[in-house]
Amino acid sequence: QKEVEQNSGPLSVPEGAIASLNCTYSDRGSQSFFWYRQYSGKSPELIMFIYSNGDKEDGRFTAQLNKASQYVSLLIRDSQPSDSATYLCAVGKAAGNKLTFGGGTRVLVKP
Amino acid sequence: AAGVIQSPRHLIKEKRETATLKCYPIPRHDTVYWYQQGPGQDPQFLISFYEKMQSDKGSIPDRFSAQQFSDYHSELNMSSLELGDSALYFCASSLGMRKEQYFGPGTRLTVT
């Protein structure tokens, strides 16, 4: 079992709809949580980070963290074709610096 | 805003050769990370430096070494290259440890 799990998709959503992505992690010592967007052949782009339980909103993106259930989610509102990409969930622990990534969820936004 | 700079962007080497990848962090960032991403895989952590000292180590082969210099740039040295080393190598930087990491454009290494 991977430390960080994501549904690989593809998640197909119509333009203007809400895309909902989920991520679970196994280490209860995890302290920091990140969502990256990655286009094919490009580098991961940080779009959201969250450290405390609850919701965090930034523009069309909302990250939700539930440490008791060990999951973090990302909502993309008013999805646009340019949102079509792979979304990587990354988790950091209290000790050490590394991020552990999930396998990514591929999102396809259809016009 | 200034971003992480990596050089070279593309590198082709033969088996058993050596390669050096360079990373220039975002100005004022004091922590640098190296990740390797193979085709169809997620990024795998290699090593990190905080204030020029190694701060964490992941699945980095013994053939690889890295350091962070006084100007905070970092270099990843790779020796005795193998075909399996072909991958995208990303450098990321952050302001402080365990903070948001911003990735550079990556170096695509091809070993033939």
Image: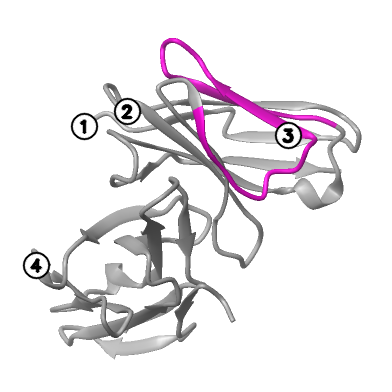
Residue range in magenta is B54-79
Instruction: Name the spot of residue A49 as percent of width and height, x first.
Output: 23, 59
| Helix, strand or loop for disc 1 | loop
Which residue has dot 1 on it?
B1
Circle 4: residue type: Glu
Q: Nearer the viewer, residue B41 or A26?
A: A26
Question: Looking at the image, is A19 positioned above or below residue B62?
Answer: below
Write down the chain letter for disc 2: B
Residue B26: give its label: 2
Residue density around tag 2, few if under 14, some if 14–19, many if 20 or more, within 10 Å: many
| Nearer-the-camera pick, B98 or A76 | B98
Question: Looking at the rendering, which quadrant does residue B46 occupy?
Answer: top right
Residue for badge 4? A57
Q: Are marks 2 and 1 in contact (CB under 8 Å)?
A: yes
Screen quadrant of the C terminus of chain B = top right
Q: Which residue sits at x=63%, y=36%?
A: B10
**Sequence-wise first label, 1 or 3:** 1
What is the distance, in whole Å, between disc 4 and disc 2 at their CAs?
Answer: 25 Å
Q: Chain of mark 1?
A: B
Image point (39%, 69%), residue name: A85
- Disc 1 crowd rating (10 Å Cα; few below 14, some 14-19, many 20+) is few
How packed mark 4 is, by other alpha carbons closer than 10 Å (few <14, some 14-19, many 20 or more), is some
